[in-house]
Amino acid sequence: MRLENKVAVVTGGASGFGEGIVRKFVAEGARVAIVDINIAAAEKLAAELGSSTTAFSADVSSAKDMADIHSHTLATFKQVDILVNNAGITHLPTPMEDVDENEFDRIFAVNAKSVYLSAKYFVPTMKAQGHGSILNVASTAGVSPRPNLSWYNASKGWMITATRAMAVELAPCNVRVNALNPVAGETPLLKSFMGEDTPEIRAKFLSTIPLGRFSTPQDMGNAACYLCSEEASMVTGVCLEVDGGRCI
């Protein structure tokens, strides 16, 4: 029960890595607001996990929706201790010059602007209460970019730098900020990263991971639980690679 009496918000929490984080947090005693643009999936997960969760539909790139996430969480649980910026999107493997401008704008709105918006609404609350933990889900793509995913790579590199900048600024307020850098995993985004899901392409991806497997939602949940718990009270500004050795 490492997160007992804690309240967490997890964006993109209805599937993939976000679902793994939600499940681990609930198992460790947290109450969790499951935020997802797919409200049916969020409500299904909340119904399974019970009264310690609530489901909320939101587009994390919208200032109004982020403000609503903040107010909904406080109205439901009366506090917020942990914020996990997990929601993210990518583009299909494409030469950088061929990515559509609207697609570029959407990637940075969801992967980068959402972190700014969440800080705008959640950081004042965490400062006022004198504690908090923010976890940004970045990617090994921001450390060791893959070809033809250039703008996704860049958005995750932005998130890594933002994590460190936030950590330095918020440390005097006792608000810790860390990130996770997963390698590709069994999530809805996997097919988008690969372009198509075939045994040959999977084998090519796996050949770059020394441990020989993809990240799982359980891997991410375990790492997130540590970084957001009091066990990591001296850890801030860390971008932890959960990647089976890919970035070595």
Image (cartoon, rainbow, N blue to C red):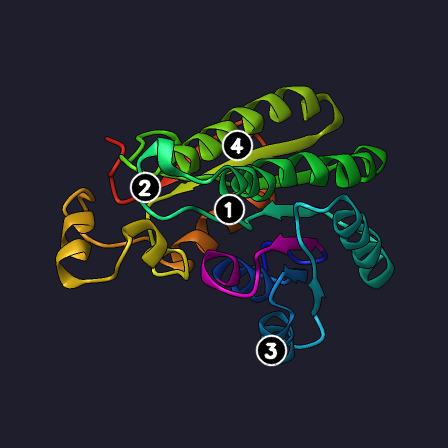
Which residue was labeled with disc 4? Answer: 159
Q: Amino acid at mark 3?
A: Lys
Given residues 153 and 119, the one toward you in this image is 153
Where residue 3 appears, as percent x and y from the top left, is 62, 55
Given residues 4 and 210, the one toward you in this image is 210
Quadrant of the image containing the C terminus: top left
Image-based side of 84 in relation to 125, left or right? left
Figure check: 170 above or below 244: above
Please tell me which residue is depicted at 63% across the width and 26% down the height of the picture. 166
Quadrant of the image containing the N terminus: bottom right
Please tell me which residue is depicted at 35% across the width and 32% down the height of the picture. 96
Q: CA distance from mark 1 to mark 3?
A: 26 Å
Q: Amino acid at mark 2?
A: Thr
Number of residues whose C-alpha sits closer than 10 Å to that of mark 2, classed few (under 14), some (14–19) or many (20 or more): some
Where residue 68 appears, as percent x and y from the top left, is 81, 53
Look at the numbered discs 1 and 3 and tell me whether their residues touch, using CB distance below 8 Å. Answer: no
Q: CA distance from mark 2 to mark 3?
A: 34 Å
- Checking the image for residue 94, the label placed there is 2
Observer-side mark, 1 or 3, equals 3
Number of residues whose C-alpha sits closer than 10 Å to that of mark 4, classed few (under 14), some (14–19) or many (20 or more): many
- Checking the image for residue 44, the label placed there is 3
Q: CA distance from mark 4 to mark 2?
A: 21 Å
Which residue was labeled with disc 1? Answer: 226
Asked whether 87 falls inside the magenta stretch, the response is no
User: Residue 129 falls in which quadrant of the image?
Assistant: top right
The span shown in magenta is 6-19
Q: Earlier in the sequence, mark 4 or mark 2?
A: 2
Look at the numbered discs 1 and 2 and tell me whether their residues touch, using CB distance below 8 Å. Answer: no
Q: Earlier in the sequence, mark 3 or mark 4?
A: 3
Image-based side of 177 in relation to 65, left or right? left
Please tell me which residue is depicted at 66% across the width and 77% down the height of the picture. 50
User: Residue 115 falls in which quadrant of the image?
Assistant: top right
